[in-house]
Image: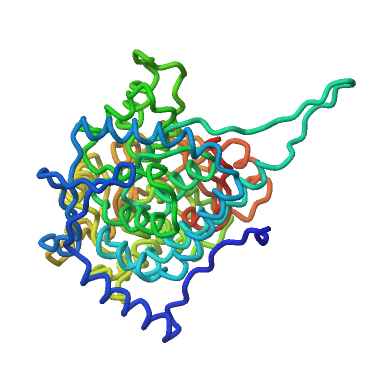
Amino acid sequence: MPTKFKNEPFTDFSKPANKKAMQQALAKVRKELGKDHPLVIGGEEIMTQDKLYSYNPAKPGEVVGVFSKANQELAGKAIETAATTFETWKNVPAKKRAEYIFKAAALMRKRKFEFSAMLTYEVGKTWPEADADTAEAIDFLEFYGREMLRYAGPQPVTEIKEEKNELRYIPLGVGVVVPPWNFALAILVGMTSAAIVTGNTVVLKPSSDSPTIGWKFFELMREVGLPAGVFNFVAGSGAAVGDLMVAHPKTRFISFTGSKEVGTHINELAAKVQPGQIWLKRVVAEMGGKDSILIDNETDLDAAAQATVASAFGFQGQKCSAASRAIVVGSIYDKFVEKVAEKTKALKVGLPEDQSNYMGPVVNKGSMEKILNYIETGVKEGGRIVAGGKRAQGDGYFVEPTVIADVDPKATIAQEEIFGPVLAVIKARNFDHALEIANNTEFGLTGGIWTKNKKKQERAKNEFHVGNFYINRKITRNVIQQILQLL
């Protein structure tokens, strides 16, 4: 039996050995950039003429990977192949399925720096951010393997005299996995491993911004001996192949993380029963956030400001849980704005492979342009830039960490998900008003509060409408708390 689950520790890069290991991994992985990769369906590698190119956002002229793009025929073949493989994979004992996952975790741990290096090149993660992504991916593998063993064991049922009842969890079928680029390894690994270890088969369509990271995980799973057809790799756009796979009558469930627009489209498409479909599909969709930190007057302002800056600008603000809004009680508003601005101006932006940089680039040119437009809109609607506000120097897609004060609670940048290094600071009359503002968006993913007042903490626990809630700490850096969603 495996040991009790514990989170994978983060790497201490102040230690010379770890620093050297990361530098060596960056050098090694750089030599792998630019390779051409196939589709893999049922173990068959397929090269197509239509290609998808992945670029380094810090050096846009550098190709990270080239991928064969699937057409609708190949996308359909992937679903059919996964459906055929499911008929044998579903009968593999849970212990054997978990062994594949545990082997993958051990191998990823051994190559931790290489996976982190690829995250640095393909999506612009700095060393600590890339390391945290890889650590969380290992956590998912270890956690879901243990959970499957738990679910495979005897389950409690209501006893009825003269009856022998039992509860068993059985797999569903084919899952389509559509992960995001921002946690290009962790979320992809979590979605995929949860489905596979519970006896389902998978067709992975990686993000077009991070297919190389998806490929590295696919290769790892192939290396540990996972049977062909259990895990199929299909690159391509959502419009070209994603809709077909979601709508396919043999698709049983879809796991998605991304924008609200795409997520609602997937829900709508999956809800329609197709000819030949004999079930209702399940959709697990996480669709972003507009996350707030509420700063009360009864708090440590220095610590609150530091936590806000860390929450807002880690990985360039490209986290669903990033602090996009700071809602500050009026009596300490000016002091807080001053402290946040000062700490933000001290952040260093540059190439993510340089350990000294706190922030790297945003993921692509379109994202950079959208973020700069949001900053302009924030000023037009009455906001006041107190830090940043421009494109940062460099050839890549760099944006200065930006703090915009005096933002109206209903302003565009206070309501829409920017997904970039922009913090809107909003003044509240008092704690009651701050809590009211915190709940005024359509999003409810993550939030936090800084206050020493226990009564206010308890009230916020009940009234702050978010799924992940934090008190007196930053609102990013989740650890594994999830349960299996796909059985």
Counting from the top left corner in percent of width and height, residue 209 is at: 24, 50
Position of residue 319 measured from the top left corner of the image (x, y, whole percent): 38, 50
Q: In the depicted view, which residue is nearer to us: 435 or 463?
A: 463
Q: Locate residue 283: give its quadrant.
A: top left
Q: How is the image coloured?
A: rainbow
Q: Residue at x 20, y 65 (%)?
A: 33
Quadrant for the N terminus in the image: bottom right
Image coordinates for residue 264, horizontal then vertical, percent? 35, 27
177 relative to 360, above or below: above
> Relative to 349, is 154 above or below?
above
Residue 273 occupies quadrant: top left
Horizontal and vertical percent for residue 429? 48, 42
Residue 80 vs residue 136, the one in the foreground = 80
**Residue 391 image-quadrant placement:** bottom left
**248, 261: nearer the viewer:** 248
Furthest toward the bottom, the residue is 16
Nearest to the observer: residue 127 or residue 469: 127
> Residue 325, can we see it?
no
